[in-house]
Image (cartoon, grey):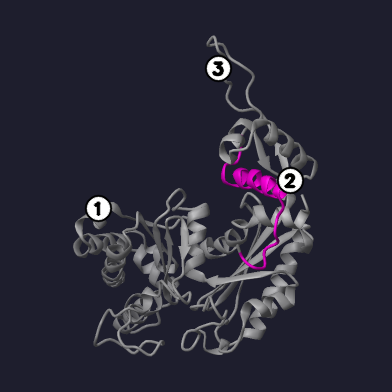
Amino acid sequence: MNAEEPILGPRQMSRLRVIEALYRHPLSSRADLAGHTQLSRATVSTLVEELVRAGLVEEAAGSGPASAGVEGGVGRPPVLLSLVSGAAFALGLDFGHQHIRVALCDLSGAPVVDDYALVEVDHAPGESLDLAQRLVNTALDSAGVAPDQLLGVGMGLAAPINSISGNLEADGILPGWHGIRPAAEMEGRLGIPVALDNDANLGALGEKAFGAARGVDDLVYIRLSAGIGAGLIIDGQPYHGRLGVAGEVGHVLSDPRGAICRCGNRGCLETVASPVAVAALLERSLRQPVTVPRLLELVAEGHRGARRAVAEAGQAVGQALSMVVNVLNPELVVVGGDLAQAGDILLSPIAAEIERHSVAPAAAAVRVTAGMLGPRAEVLGAAALILAKSPRALVAKLGV
């Protein structure tokens, strides 16, 4: 247990078990909850009534399937229960290199507000944090949600984050943020607890909670945007490594003679396969400006050079991921970020390289798929970071 988490008494722990069961298994009957919590039916019924009175649990509209009687007849359908989605909210913030996105989600994870602003983030930490504060206040106002209804704020940044010190490892990646403590800065502006993580880690959480990786406990999420990073989930839990910088796949060696990377090394995967790098390669070939959106348009139009450039980027990504597949043996690789919009022209080479370079059992066990959440993966993952802690937070915050 985190040292900052309140100590709960026996009665609160029982309520917590019921709330956690409803969070993980929505639309459960009292009998279901007894099975999930290992509490007696009578205890569950009493706790449910208390939680209904507290405004945290409600009976779902309609009814569950009828139950069979001892003689094969049909009994009364069970009453299904769920958490009250509007009892509390979680807020996600995603700081990209050129955008800030905010999502206000209810307890079910449904976004009540989803908004973003285009802004230069890398060299303007103060202005970016101020803008995020305004976006949060606007989101709360538009949804009619009071700050005290928030369980917390999840915040993602496009840089490695030292999980021990809370500092950014931002040199060369977010150059203007050196020495900034983003979570503390955001908490000071909002007056609400802020949990900070790397954007790729949050993308993995988002796809697991709401997208392509639902029900999958061993996965790699790779984000191909201005930078390249991977979020890792192992045995159902996010994996950060000793200092919180696990998953920096964008900075593994891809081309020993390649360009100098912003991290200071040479020939990193990011210099070869990021959307920016692919667009720059095509720009030199076509001798005209090529933005990332224009690159994706050319791919969609069937432009031969654009499709080849993206396919070769996919090969480089697949080669790097083959090492990850060998080490971690995941069930799923989810590809997100801007370049994922290219579709099979990117995904097929990634899968082929994993098949070619990973050991046969690991290659046979893994699937490669595009993310389902698109540009919302990271911000919804930031909200999911808070929602995963919501049962305990609800018990402590509402005093039930």
Identity, as a three-letter code, of the amino acid under mark 1: Ala
Q: Quadrant of the N terminus?
A: bottom right
Q: Which residues are magenta?
A: 2-28
| Image-quadrant location for residue 129 | bottom right
Q: Is residue 319 left or right of residue 230?
A: left
Nearest to the observer: residue 221 or residue 315: 221
Please tell me whether mark 1 or mark 2 is closer to you in this view: 2
Where is residue 183? Give x, y as percent: 64, 76
Identity, as a three-letter code, of the amino acid under mark 3: Ala
Where is residue 59? Give x, y as percent: 70, 35
Q: Is residue 285 left or right of residue 275?
A: left
Asked if 52 appears above or below 324 in the picture, the reply is above
Report the disc number at residue 364.
1
Residue with the mark numbered 2: 56
Q: Earlier in the sequence, mark 1 or mark 2?
A: 2
Q: Residue at x 79, y 45 (%)?
A: 54
